[in-house]
Amino acid sequence: MRHKNRIAAGAVLIIAVGSAGLTLSRRVAAQSPQPADPIADNAQAMVNDGRKIFRFDTFGDEAYWGDTIKLHQAVAGAKLGGVGPGVSPKTALAVGLKVDVDALPPAIVSGLKAGTVDLTDPATTLALMSLNAVVGITGFFSPDGKQLQSMGVQCALCHSTVDDSLAPSVGHRLDGWANRDLNVGAIVALAPDLSVLTKLLGADDATVRTVLNSWGPGKFDAELLLDGKAFRPDGQSGAVLIPPAFGLAGVNLGTWTGYGQTTYWNAFVANLEMHGKGTFFDERLNDATQFPIAAKAGFGNVRADSDLITSKLAALHFYQLAIPAPPSVEIGVFSFTARRGQALFNGKAKCAACHVPPLFTEPGYNLHTPQEIGIDDFQANRSPAKGYRTAPLRGLLTHQKGGFFHDGRFPTLRAVVDHYDDFLGTGLTDDEKNDLVEYLRTL
């Protein structure tokens, strides 16, 4: 009996202690912070890293832009240790460069507002570069900060602009927006030494500079260094419009002519166009018939001694996919006109057959032959896929400068609607075309 009583007493003690322990555990759990969410933490870290890479990483390309073609010397000018007259802020803004107001100290902001900052002096340009205030460009200075010794470029050079909140071309960054003011060709043509390009293309210096200056604002010819085709059969430049880099989540192909997804294009551009130091592989570029320049130069298999690109591609891609398209306009603002246009978009005009809402491109493989969209095949044939991507339509009004389609051949949305009405035989009336355009303006 005594033994049984001891067992019973022990059981009561265990239950009591257990209950108290359970209560204490609940209290501790209630007071302890919630466990970390590794997915959310990783997503935020990727966005933060990707933003820095997109805005500020040169991938080591200063070895090309500075050391090789010596573009920094033209920027500085002879009076500041370079060559020529130099590039003043006035000139820089004229070729489409943008200034990040958030990188400027209060004194310069006040001076810009008051008009006391000298925008005709290249020294001011160098001062802005030293502040990392010129969007997409990094200057590398001597230890005393007095001489510009090299320079590099970032993704943001072409795929960011500013909101002009302080002055034209000076404001807060708008990442992912195509800089349709940027005259890339004219900027590169300033470089004192283009011998690396003349040797690659097998052309003389004057010809290369003529080609670069033919691009014009908002355009770039990424295929020039692959196939050497500087001009279309009609004599126009082979350069295409800089596309926006926002609203790409869920979109398969990231380029006008379907080379690959956005992360492919990041690797392609960082290695072959920005001339950074990394690794790039695409055996399609070994086709000497289609890509004679690339095949000869070995661009299908690039291996740098020190890879400054590959480790950054994941975060860069993640950030780009996180950049939303600008908010669409409420259709109600445009009353019944845009609503009628929306009905036409989804019905009679046949737009939604390819531009499937809400992605406004096809889910899946969003590439078409030139014959399917009723245009020539020049640019399509410069890519391995030999087709044209169905471009997503969100934020159309942010990149209307320069026209529409890959080369800006249609100056207005109405011209695009006219083309498809004629090609597809949809039989839209003039009023219906206007309604459709009004809807497109809301996207």
Image (cartoon, rainbow, N blue to C red):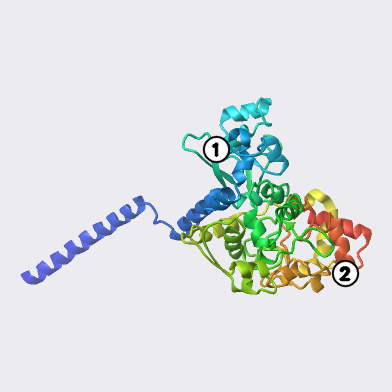
Residue at the extreme left of the image, as rendered: 2
Please state, as top left, top right, bottom left or bottom right, where the C terminus lies in the image. bottom right
> Which residue does the image show at 39% across and 56% down from the upper left?
35
Name the spot of residue 261 as percent of width and height, x first: 62, 66
Residue 267 lies in quadrant: bottom right
Residue 319 lies in quadrant: bottom right
Residue 414 lies in quadrant: bottom right
First along the sequence among labels 1 and 2? 1
Left or right, residue 242 beside residue 339: left
Q: Decide if residue 100 is in sight here.
A: no
Question: Comparing marks 1 and 2, which lies closer to the viewer?
Answer: 1
Name the spot of residue 327 as percent of width and height, x first: 69, 51
Q: For the residue marked with disc 1, what is the amino acid?
A: Ser
> Which residue does the image show at 69% across and 50% down from the upper left?
184
Left or right, residue 148 beside residue 288: left
- In the image shown, does 164 or 195 lie closer to the viewer? 195
Name the spot of residue 56 as percent of width and height, x first: 54, 48
Mark 1–mark 2 Cα distance, whole angstroms, equals 52 Å
> Which residue does the image show at 56% across and 40% down from the upper left?
132
